[in-house]
Image (tube, rainbow, N blue to C red):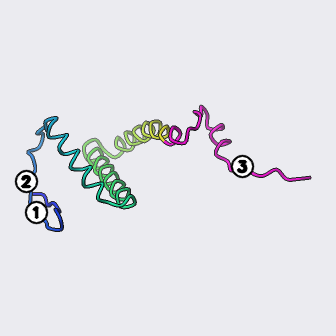
Amino acid sequence: MRRRVETGAIRETRSAPAGRKTTPNAQARLRRKAQQILRQLFPKERESLIIKCWMSHDARWFMVVATTFGLEAAMCLNRVAVREEGRVEARRPMHRLQLPPVHSASKYLRRSEPRRPMMAS
């Protein structure tokens, strides 16, 4: 049994059996319901909730891999996942801020340095 908070009251719900897939219609309904719930939160609350959920998922993923395949394998897979995630996620703010692509670390560092005013001689 899982507990679910609904309009201030806690209600017991039954989880679907493990491995059971949801239909596309059920997925769409769940997505709409999640969007309704998230819209009720202030932006900072929504951000905090998403961060906590992601961190919880990440920790559980790591623990399952570590207990199944060993700590060394979990650390190796985590490095690969983080590297790939960085490649994908680095593009989002660059696109949003309309920055041109950076192809080397030195160019990135030069671009990210704060601009200093020229000193008059």
The reply, left or right, for residue 56 in relation to residue 101 is left
Q: Residue at x 37, y 54 (%)?
A: 51
Q: Position of residue 43 (x, y in %)?
A: 38, 58
How many C-alpha atoms fall within 10 Å of the one at disc 3: few (<14), some, or many (≥20)?
Answer: few
Tell me: 81 left or right of 4: right
Find out whether residue 88 is within the magenta segment.
no
User: Residue 119's mark?
Assistant: none
- Closest to the camera, between mark 2 and mark 1, is 1
Q: Nearer the viewer, mark 2 or mark 3?
A: 3
Q: Which quarter of the figure is the N terminus placed in?
A: bottom left
Q: Secondary structure at mark 2?
A: loop
The residue type indicated by label 2 comes to: Arg
Contact, mark 2 vs mark 3 (Cβ under 8 Å):
no
Q: Inspect the image, locate mark 1, and give the three-letter code of the amino acid beneath it.
A: Arg
Q: Are marks 2 and 1 in contact (CB under 8 Å)?
A: no
**Dot 1 surroundings within 10 Å: few (below 14), some, or many (20 or more)?**
few
- The image shows residue 116 at horizontal and vertical percentages of 75, 51
Q: From the image, tell me which residue sits under label 2.
A: 14
Q: Residue at x 14, y 67 (%)?
A: 9
10 or 103: nearer the viewer: 10
> Which picture quadrant has residue 21?
top left
Separation of marks 3 and 1 at Cα, in angstroms: 56 Å
Look at 25% across and 43% down and name the residue there.
68
Q: Is residue 100 left or right of residue 13?
A: right
Alpha carbon of mark 2 to alpha carbon of mark 3: how far? 57 Å
Query: Left or right: 112 with respect to 92?
Result: right
Disc 3 residue type?
Answer: Arg
Task: Please provide the residue range marked out in magenta.
Answer: 93-121
